[in-house]
Image (cartoon, rainbow, N blue to C red):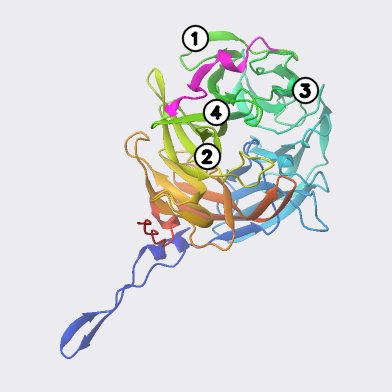
Amino acid sequence: MSHLAPHLRRAVAFTFAAGLLAQAPVVPPPAPATVTLTDDGAYCWYQDPRAIVDPATPGGPTVLVSSVAFLAGRRGDLDVHWHQPATKSGGSFVLHKALEADDHAAAALCQRPDGRYLAVYCQHGRDQLVRWRVSERPHDASAWREEQSLRANARVTYSNLFWLEDAAGDVRLFDFARADGFDPNWFVSDDAGDAFRYGGKLHTGPGGNDATRQRPYVRYAANGTAALHFVTTDGHPRDEDNSVYHGVLRRGVLSGSDGEELGRLSTGPTSDQRANDFTVVLRAGDAVQGTGMRHAWTLDLRVDAAGQPRAALLARADGDDHDHRFLYARRDGDEWRVRQLCRAGAFLYAAENDYTGLVALHAHDPDVVVVSTPIDPRDDQPLAHYELFLGRTADAGASWTWSPLTWASEVDNLRPLLPDAGPQQTVLLWLRGRVRTYTDWQASVVGRFVATAELASLSVPGQVPRRRP
């Protein structure tokens, strides 16, 4: 990744003229290298991890990401793509030909203890199959074993993979998916993903097990294998004026943010826990910096070095779907503090009037975020396209400094990802192109790769538009 560092240096030339030392104009640094992993792909944001980094591949770490193709001849193909920054090499493999032309069908990825990769995926609620494949060889994504599947007791959507301790303290592989009752359910593997079985239901919406059209939207983050943190909504923001809640799963026991036990993890298709049994992070209508926030949605979640959760949220300012705000929520001591990150604009398209550019929290420094927005967070001026900005806070989210990661783009830059690449490296992935709907897009998956100590080198020159008088 050292090839990315030179653009930090500004070239200054000196010449002598008429016996005087003259300084030439400062040459602006070139934009950092952006690598295209595929020129045809998109993903949703309720699968995790959509991208992983294998640190042990020969020749250096390898980045893997899953996406769904849309162009003619490949429409609906579920792919895994990989790139090795050190050797500038990579490739792609079709996990399932013509699975579904829907970005919700992207896979969750993980690496097994034997070094092989595992991909778990579903259609967007069209059937009851949880599907998965394991790579043929360790540290090699170019060949995969035949697809396996499990028929669940309801239609399934999304996959979220985590290694967690069960009630006995044994580490098993869990997959959290939307299934029975449109609620988050869990599946489990005792052999690192060779086979899965149904486990039970994590929780329901506020209406309980009988409210089968309430759909809580959940983001998950693990604190090692000891605990799974999650933030969840009441339902879809077009159907519910959502609040957001935080819960924790530790060794088969569910609790709120304070650790008080709420009940044991269900081992069947019903659960005694409802979304609103967990700790409130943001209540519908709560004022953030003087503006009431409504119809919230969950975007990203991380656990910091102290074991405390940080969440990125989305909400409509005073209920206005043309004025979305990105919010930053962190657990400080015994309370949640929610502050505004920046404005997120209106919506990508009217049929899903809470779809925005999204936010990613850095895996090893959640005081660092990347946002995709059509409004410059430095001065709140509108932009021609969705651009990416790197945000940093030094005061627990009370204020942010911003620098552009893309600028003056000819297309949108959407859905940033910051997969866990270890503390020393940072990997940034995103979609570049146009997302018309979740079943219609023309986008590439692109990325940049730097040493974490050189995060500033991700930025590109971006002049701040002047405020209108």
> Which segment did they paint magenta?
271-287
CA gap between label 4 and label 3 equals 21 Å
* Location of mark 3 (residue): 197
Which residue sits at x=80%, y=55%?
A: 74
Q: How crowded is mark 1: few (under 14 residues within 10 Å), some or many (20 or more)?
A: few
Where residue 222 is drawn, which disc sits there?
4
Q: Position of residue 246 (x, y in %)?
A: 53, 21
Q: Where is residue 275 in the image (x, y as percent from the top left)?
A: 60, 18
* Location of mark 2 (residue): 324
Instruction: Residue 38: say if magenta.
Output: no
Front-most of 310 and 290? 290
CA gap between label 4 and label 2 equals 28 Å
CA gap between label 1 and label 3 equals 29 Å
CA gap between label 3 and label 2 equals 39 Å
Which residue sits at x=63%, y=48%?
A: 64
Which residue sits at x=54%, y=21%?
A: 245
Task: Name which of mark 4 and mark 2 comes first in the sequence.
Answer: 4
* Location of mark 1 (residue): 260
Residue 235 lies, with reference to residue 75, above or below; the image says: above
